[in-house]
Image: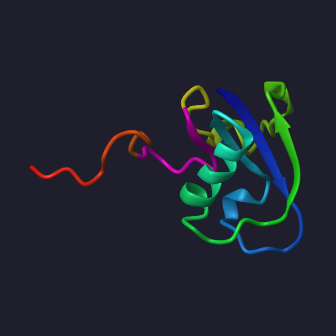
Amino acid sequence: MRRYWFTFRGEAPRPTGMTLGCGVTAYTEEDAIRLIREVALEGAPLPAIEHIHEDFPFDMLDVNHVIPNMGVMVERGVWFPNLGALPHPRTPTNQST
């Protein structure tokens, strides 16, 4: 898996937490974009992407806002903004008990 950091341009609507960017761990760039759309944006349109950093150095992340507020970056998913514990993508969410 790869780490991605996305930055966006313009005034496109997005969650406040994505003003600095969005951090994702995914299999591919396309998988990362899919996770942003489905998880971070909950199906809302993807803002225009300004830049995609792949496997970037950890020290490029903002130490005052991103690092103290990010989730787990070693598992597949969106880790910034930290959306809290979400079901694993391969775990069915509609299990009957």
Describe residue 67's horizontal placement relative to residue 9 as left or right: left
- Using the image as rendered, state which of residue 20 and residue 49 is in the foreground: 49
Residue 70, magenta (yes or no): no
Please provide percent x and percent y for residue 19: 77, 60
Residue projecting furthest to the left: 97
Please provide percent x and percent y for residue 6: 79, 48
Please provide percent x and percent y for residue 86: 42, 46
Image position of 61 with respect to 45: above or below: above
**Identity of the residue drawn at 9% across and 49% down:** 97
Locate residue 63: give its quadrant: top right
Please provide percent x and percent y for residue 31: 64, 44
Describe residue 75's horizontal placement relative to residue 63 as left or right: left
Q: Which residues are magenta?
A: 76-86
Locate residue 29: give its quadrant: top right
Describe residue 61's horizontal placement relative to residue 28 as left or right: right
Image position of 86 with respect to 37: above or below: above
- Using the image as rendered, state which of residue 65 and residue 55 is in the foreground: 55
Image position of 36 with respect to 76: above or below: below
Image position of 2 with respect to 93: above or below: above
**Identity of the residue drawn at 66% across and 41% down:** 24
Q: Name the colouring of the figure.
A: rainbow
**Identity of the residue drawn at 69% across and 51% down:** 33
The secondary structure that most of the magenta stretch takes on is loop
**Identity of the residue drawn at 63% across and 42% down:** 69
